[in-house]
Amino acid sequence: LSQVDSSVGGKTGINLEEGKNLVGSFHQPRAVITDVSLLQTLPKREIIAGYAEILKCSILGDKDFFNWLKINQKEILNLNNNLVAEAVEKSCILKAKIVEEDEKESGKRALLNLGHTFGHAIENKINKDGHGILHGEAIGIGMCLAAELSVEMNLCSKENKEEIIQIIRKSGLPTDLKDLNMEIYAEEIIKIFSLDKKRKDNSNTFILISDIGNAIIKNEINDDKLKTFLISNGFK
């Protein structure tokens, strides 16, 4: 996860009880050094969770990368070093390019939050309740919900949505609440959304999808619409 995500971007945030990354600063590293052979020390669940951020990069900004992942996903998850190194490099280059254009997230950098508004809220709720979910697992569900919301708002096709959900499911990541076998109330998630750093004027900003490889920033999504959406997608 850190090799493809937190290592690049310069955020030095910490979490509060209210949510993730709410306090911090920006401090860019002089260099990022990655050794993919270290991944051999991780359990499979952590590998799959880290892979979620690789999928995210392809979905938000590089359709060719997405198609390459579809072909090579199994070998990447089985830690073929050459393929893993290529996937990590592609992800870091994509993220670094976006960060270079918008270091302090005043615009385009928000695209890197694809799946994260839903994902952070799910992660916050589940982990605070004493259960356990990894960041990448929550982001897997978050990306699926973002794809579903994109279709509901007529921003992307059902075919694209299904393609995105399918690659996430095949990786071993959860794709909906049924995979977690627990109940989460929509009202609880809406309350967590209220603390999201992208929220403005009592409405929500989400990163949604117009096409595989093309994410967009969608503002002014109200809480009532989100509550209806969440309930239709398995929340109580």
Image (cartoon, rainbow, N blue to C red):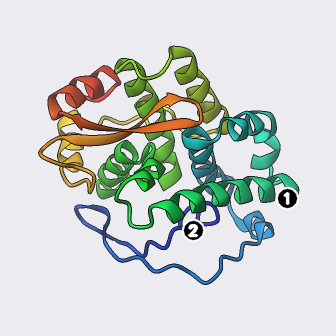
Q: Find numbered disc 1 in the image and state the secondary structure of the residue it sits on.
A: helix
Locate residue 185 relative to residue 106 in the image: left or right.
Answer: left
Q: How far apart are marks 2 and 1 (CA)?
A: 20 Å
Where does residue 98 sit, x and y in percent of width and height? Answer: 53, 57
Query: Seen from this angle, which residue lies furthest front?
Result: 101
Q: Residue at position x 59%, y 59% from top?
A: 97
Q: Mark 2 points at which residue?
A: 8
Q: Residue at position x 48%, y 54% from top?
A: 135
Query: Seen from this angle, which residue lies furthest left?
Result: 202
Where does residue 230 sit, x and y in percent of width and height? Answer: 29, 28
Placement of 5 over or under 226, stated as above or below:
below
Instruction: State which tag comes first along the sequence, 2 or 1.
Output: 2
Placement of 80 over or under 228, stated as above or below:
below
Kind of residue at badge 2: Val
Q: Name the residue under label 1.
A: 81
Locate residue 46 relative to residue 177 in the image: left or right.
Answer: right
Kind of residue at badge 1: Asn
- Quadrant containing the C terminus is top left
In this rendering, the count of numbered labels is 2
